[in-house]
């Protein structure tokens, strides 16, 4: 395989996307998708679509976390989840079109993948034992996409809770403007 992953990045101690598990899992999914598509996907268009969905999911997490507005963060995090949903469907299509088996959520190897803790600075190398053959590799990525979507649902719930508690960017800016005018 000619794919080369970047070395680890420093973690932002104050928070931000570098401290989010969904970001690091997104990096892993993006790296593994690049390897998978290079190895198994012959159609340039499909390869490009899958790589773009993996990239979009990760990049929307970054962009959302850098937004000034909670509303913008919510929207982009939702787009990230949709990108992983699209990628998930591509992997299921690959299994179906190639006569390969979709592993059940209680299949021992799926349980093992689900139990793996996704930590900051993790890399795709955590999962190298699954890369060997197409059925295993595809089911790994399907499981990681499901895991990512679950984690993004939790992140979306946390962002929504923050919005309800603290309000939105425009709302808070308007409140500050009103305070300024009162003084």
Image: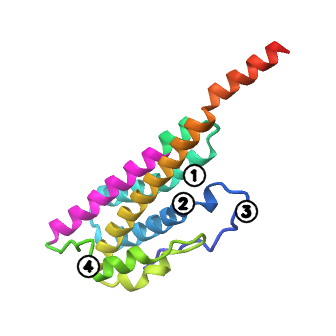
Q: Quadrant of the N terminus?
A: bottom left
Query: Residue 103 or 174: which is nearer the viewer?
Result: 174
| Element at label 2 | helix
Q: Which residues are magenta?
A: 77-98
Q: Which residue is mark 4?
A: 107
| Element at label 4 | loop
Task: Determine whether 76 is above or below 133 in the image.
Answer: above
Label 3 vs label 4: CA separation? 37 Å
Q: Position of residue 46 (x, y in %)?
A: 29, 58
Q: Quadrant of the C terminus?
A: top right
Pointer 3 local density, CA inside 10 Å: few below 14, some 14–19, many at least 20:
few
Do residues under tags 1 and 2 come within 8 Å of each other at their CB atoms?
yes
Label 1 vs label 2: CA separation? 7 Å
**Which residue shows up at 39% across the image and 86% down it?**
129
Question: Given this view, does label 2 or label 4 mark the residue nearer the observer?
Answer: 4
Residue 11 sits inside the magenta stretch: no
Task: Determine whether 106 is above or below 145 in the image.
Answer: below
Q: Which numbered tag is attached to residue 82?
A: none
Task: Determine whether 35 is above or below 174 in the image.
Answer: below
Q: Position of residue 152 (x, y in %)?
A: 45, 54
Pointer 2 local density, CA inside 10 Å: few below 14, some 14–19, many at least 20:
many
Question: Given this view, does label 4 or label 1 mark the residue nearer the observer?
Answer: 4
Query: Residue 69 or 106: which is nearer the viewer?
Result: 106
Do residues under tags 2 and 4 come within 8 Å of each other at their CB atoms?
no
Label 3 vs label 1: CA separation? 16 Å
Label 2 vs label 3: CA separation? 15 Å
Q: Which residue is mark 1?
A: 62
Question: Given this view, does label 3 or label 1 mark the residue nearer the observer?
Answer: 3
Q: Which residue is mark 2?
A: 23
Q: Which residue is mark 3?
A: 13
83 lies left or right of 15: left
């Amino acid at each position: 395989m000619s794919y080369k992953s970047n070395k680890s990045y420093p973690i932002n101690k104050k928070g931000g996307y570098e401290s989010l598990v969904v970001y690091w899992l997104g990096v892993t999914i993006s790296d593994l998708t690049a390897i998978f598509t290079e190895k198994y996907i012959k159609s340039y268009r499909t390869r490009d679509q899958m790589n773009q969905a993996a990239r979009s999911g990760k990049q929307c997490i970054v962009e959302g976390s850098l937004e000034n507005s909670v509303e913008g963060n919510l929207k982009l995090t939702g787009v990230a989840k949709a990108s992983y949903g699209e990628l998930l469907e591509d992997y299921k299509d690959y299994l179906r079109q190639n006569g390969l088996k979709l592993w059940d959520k209680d299949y021992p190897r799926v349980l093992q993948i689900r139990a793996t803790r996704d930590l900051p600075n993790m890399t795709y190398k955590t999962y190298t034992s699954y890369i060997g053959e197409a059925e295993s590799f595809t089911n790994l990525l399907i499981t990681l996409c499901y895991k990512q979507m679950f984690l993004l649902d939790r992140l979306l719930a946390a962002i929504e809770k923050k919005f309800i508690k603290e309000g939105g960017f425009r709302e808070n800016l308007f409140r500050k403007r009103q305070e300024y005018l009162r003084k």
